Amino acid sequence: MTPTFAHRMDRVVPNAIGELLALGADPSIISFGGGYPDPTLFPAEALAQVFDDVIRAPGGQAMQYAPSDGLPLLREQVAELMTADGTPCTAADVLILQGSQQGLDFSARMMVDPGDVIVTEDPTFLGGRIAFDPSEPVYAPIPMDQDGMRMDVLQQVLETTPRVKMIYTIPEFQNPTGVTLSLARRRRLIELANAHNVIVLEDTPYRQIRFSGETLPTLKSLDTQGRVIHLGSFSKVLVPGLRVGWAVASPALLGKMALLKLANDTQTSTLNMAATSLYLDRHDLAAHVAILRAAYARKKAVMLDAMRRHFPQDVTVTDPEGGLFTWATFREGFDATAFMRDVALPEARVAYVPGASFHPVTPRANTARFNYSAQPEARIEEGIAALGAALKRHA
Ligand code: PMP
């Protein structure tokens, strides 16, 4: 039979870039494509110990069902981390999620009816769109510059577009550009959201991975009206395989989200929550993050230095103050998707993510995202050199 899918499935389709990236999984290819943390920095021994201990603990609590909003102690620990980071909150303000990705899905499901408008950065995180698409939104992408989303354009869009429900932003070291939203723009964004009664979805998986510059206040900490949904994650500071993230939001928003959590998957894995909680209790997360920061800062420097030496002069790249990505802009007329398919993969044996897929409405062809966290430093140099040589050959 031919299944008659619900309307919301119309936009739930494979992504052409996904197919291209699957080719990059070949081990003979140096991939700068995925957003993977460096697996050699995973605290495997510490995690092995805490998993062992929570499983063996008398009473079997870590193997039992848990409250749908998360283990109380972990909610408390997340509230402490948030408070120390300048966003005061208590355990009651925290909902534990299966990764921050689940918070993207839930936020759209809670707030967005078909035809409602979601404002995004342009470009924006592809996984955000994948999560939002089943809610059938219309996207209003806002161009960015070196200080993040442009507030003059946001203002204009909010003044002229009916049905804007939500502004989605990744304020720190944005995926895909690596750009950080300035303090002045954070304040302005909150002002505009207040004036137009719009929800702000703040997605911060890279926030802790800062190499340079001052830590800036979260949008949630600037929110006086309970309109910011803040999402955080242990994926980049511990390991993504735990699938433990969280939301901090007003009681009205968090209460609804907790109901979706119950409907969706009952709760995040008790084992993973208990292990995360015991890890936080026993180990100094900040000390571990300091190791990650130093390693990723070095890798970023290696990649940018290699790009400067090997890429044609007309390629520009962003210089992120943290996170895992830099964003390259090639000459006008360059097609990064075609180049990856025809040259980078088969000839240079290098993968990146062509920028087209990150633009919600109008794809731009001459951009690409490069991840510097996953590959060893020598492979970064080797891959960028091979790609640079191919770019020059085919210029
Ligand atoms: N938001 C952004 C901007 C991301 O880059 C990612 C993952 N790369 C996520 C959310 C999802 O992260 P997780 O579900 O692992 O917390």
Image: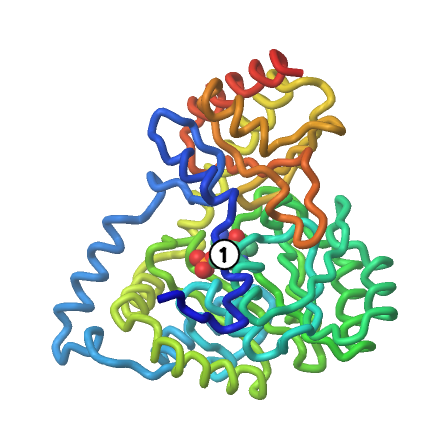
Q: Amino acid at mark 1?
A: Val
Q: Is residue 260 above or below residue 173?
A: below
Of 79 and 165, nearer the camera is 165
Residue at (48% x, 34% y) in the render: 32
The image quarter containing residue 108 is bottom right
Residue 177: percent from the left, percent from the top? 64, 44
- Give the SS element for disc 1: loop
**Horizontal placement of 353 versus 378: left or right?**
right
- Name the spot of residue 104 as percent of width and height, x first: 53, 67
302 over 278 or under it: above or below: above
Residue situated in front as seen by the camera: 232 or 5: 5
- Relative to 290, is 214 on the left or the right? right
On screen, residue 266 above or below 373: below
343 or 383, nearer to the observer: 343
What residue appears at the point 30 percent right and 70 percent down from the top-left corner? Answer: 269
Q: Residues within 10 Å of mark 1 (few under 14, many from 20)?
A: few
Q: How did the renderer colour the structure?
A: rainbow
Is residue 83 visible from the viewing direction of this image?
A: no
For this orientation, the residue located farthest to the front is: 1
User: Split into 4 quadrants, where in the image is the C terminus?
Assistant: top right
Locate the N terminus by quadrant: bottom left
Q: Position of residue 70 (x, y in %)?
A: 37, 78
In the picture of the structure, the residue carrying the numbered disc 1 is: 13
Residue 55 occupies quadrant? bottom left
Instruction: Tell whether 20 sits left or right of 1.
Output: right
Instruction: Look at 37% across and 82% down and name the residue there.
Output: 68
Q: Residue 162: percent from the left, percent from the top?
A: 80, 74
